[in-house]
Amino acid sequence: MSDDMISMLEEALSMFIYLGVELTLLFLVISFIVGVIQELIPADKIQKILSSKSGKGYFSAAILGGLTPFCSCSTIPMLTGLLKARAGFGPTITFLFTSPLLNPIIIGLFLATFGWQVTLIYSSIALVVSVTAGYCLEKMNFERYIRPEVFGDKPVTGCSGSAEKSTVNSVACEATGSVTDAGIESDAEKVGCGGAIALENASENRNRWSRIWQETWSQFTKVLPYLLLGIAIGAFTYGFIPADLIVQYAGADNLFAIPVAAVIGVPLYIRAEAVIPLSAALAAKGMGMGAIMALIIGSAGASLTEVILLKSMFRKPMIIAFLLVIFAMAILAGLLFNLFF
């Protein structure tokens, strides 16, 4: 085996381990946080904030996406949580598109690398296309392509659950309370009804954290095979496709540079935080600005790992629509940048 082949294998293996550890930790942490949010915030509140009945829901989803520094894969747990909470489908899909493309880290890197004009155009394109795509997919009833198992069964919480528990506690206190006339003393009389309820609530809080973790772990084990497959493909691509090959097929003189860069970007699975500095080097090697933008959006907005994970949540038409939106966004951005830069 040649030294070059060994080097490529080492790079691919290193990337596989790095992505595996990073995405596993991110998935577990984000899933747990989403579980806590679902436990503390009633589903109807989330539905109201991210409702698709007005433009406010789409705007809220775009802000939420911009404030969450997730890569395309670590967006999935949050997406699952929003779907389970029955948030508006259009705003939820808007979040799916904006989260990996418009977070503060990416915007900061864009400003430092390309300046405010490029950053403004990039942000505007990503925002407009994401909101438009979410709205159109909602109107086209793509919600019907969500797999039923995504929703699952959620334990009853909130006011109705609390009221039910209080009633049970009250009945228990009445049943175990002392009968002073008969001179009978019980444990409830010693502790007091309020103390019994407090102990019950403390136990419930411990059970709540345990239940959230169990749901998190269950969700993780379901997507783990998809996650490992996607990471393996991404790591192989990272290790065996050199940067010079990208420049060769996506150079400034190539008429098909923009669509080629968009297509190349998805299997690369490079986070925007990494692809933006890389893009500066590719530009120095002769890659056109339009192709660079297409590469950034293609690689940050989607990845094979994410697509594989999305297949566990959506049926094929929604997966195709997702990829078409990312490619359309990448090509549109590339064409506009070729016109203005």
Image (tube, helix red, strand yellow):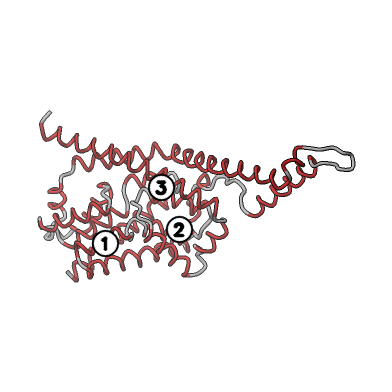
Inspect the image, locate mark 2, and give the three-letter code of the amino acid beneath it. Thr
Q: Are marks 1 and 2 in contact (CB under 8 Å)?
A: no
In front of the other: 146 or 218: 218
Inspect the image, locate mark 1, and give the three-letter code of the amino acid beneath it. Gly
User: Can you tell which quarter of the image residue 152 is in?
Assistant: top right
Closer to the N terminus: mark 1 or mark 2?
A: 2
Q: Which residue is mark 2?
A: 92
Residue at the location (51% across, 39% down)? Answer: 214
In the rendering, at what x and y percent does residue 207 appear?
Answer: 57, 40
* Mark 3, secondary structure of its residue: helix
**Whole-Å distance between the Cαs marked 1 and 2?**
25 Å
Residue at the location (50% across, 69% down)? Answer: 54
Q: Which residue is mark 3?
A: 310
In the rendering, at what x and y percent does residue 186 appear?
Answer: 79, 37
Which label belongs to residue 98? none
In front of the other: 5 or 137: 5
Q: Which residue is mark 1?
A: 108
**Whole-Å distance between the Cαs marked 3 and 1?**
28 Å
In the rendering, at what x and y percent does residue 204 appear?
Answer: 61, 43
Closer to the N terminus: mark 2 or mark 3?
A: 2
